[in-house]
Image (spheres, helix red, strand yellow):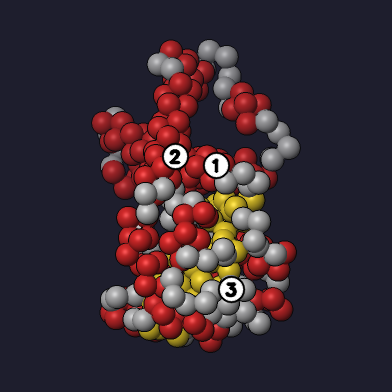
Amino acid sequence: MIDNNTFNTTKIGFIGCGNMSSAIIKGMVQAQFNAADIAVSNRSLTKLQSLQKGVGIAITQNNLEICENSEVIVLSIKPQMFETVCRPLANIDLSGKLIISIAAGVKTTQISKLLKQNLAVVRAMPNTPAMISEGATGLFANQQCNQQQIEIAGNIFQSVGKIAWVKNENQINTVTAIAGSAPAYVYLFMQAMIDQAVALGFTAQDARDLVTQSVLGTAKLAQVKSGIPLDDLRQAVTSPGGTTFEAIQSFNNNNFSEIVKKAVNAAYDRGVSLGNDGEKL
């Protein structure tokens, strides 16, 4: 549930105007957050004007202005840009403000170090379905965050989907591996199914329609039947000796579960590596 009373008394500024921050801003406005209390900065005036035209927020090309005028500052920038963007902001008094970062691998301690202040920082790892308000976001708050700041951060990301808080910052790397990167895994799986359907005589469009709807419907059914183990739901579709049974046997014979585990671990390890690289900032 979005707390609009809290939302409507908070000024939130975004540094960065990419796809993710644009999706979050649009979701916030749809969730009845006051657009006049949202501001965003970016080097590209064209991007800023395009977003402003759609939702009516304030825009600027000055990151310092965002920091000075916002109670919540969302750093929507790539990890490799963190030092370049944050160094000039270190001379601003950010005490009492909440910093939210959506950069993979950049730790809360690194953010405070770059900004040269002991700050309230929330790390968030949203995924791209946030663009249609169906995102999944993992969140971590450091010890400097108070309850109101935690609630505000939760409200922001609830406006574009479901959220889950983690107690250990290292678990954000797990969120990255199982939610942040998950859309890419699913797209890869869907494309392989579509390609084979085309090989078996379907048109590419018909194959895409069937596969994407099947994945969408399956995910929704799994949410509706949340009290039933996924393995039980799978078995309900898998008649012994039937077509699905043969497909599952093929997956198992080719170590499908191990392939997925290795992929998730690879994403997790890369998240850890990015964090370690960031220690040099």
Q: CA distance from mark 2 to mark 1?
A: 8 Å
Where does the N terminus fall, quadrant-wise? bottom right
Secondary structure, mark 2, is helix
Q: Of the residues under marks 2 and 3, which one precedes in the sequence? A: 3
The vertical placement of 246 against 34, above or below, is above
Percent coordinates x, y for residue 155 in the rendering: 64, 66
The vertical placement of 29 against 118, above or below, is below
Secondary structure, mark 1, is loop
Q: CA distance from mark 2 to mark 3?
A: 29 Å
Percent coordinates x, y for residue 190 in the rendering: 38, 39
Question: Residue 155, labelled with which disc?
Answer: none
Q: In the rendered image, which residue does mark 2 sit on?
A: 272
Residue 240 in view, yes or no: yes
Identity of the amino acid at label 3?
Answer: Ser
Which residue is pictured at 56% across the width and 63% down the height?
118
Q: In the rendered image, which residue does mark 1 sit on?
A: 170
Tags 2 and 1 in contact by the CB under 8 Å rule? yes
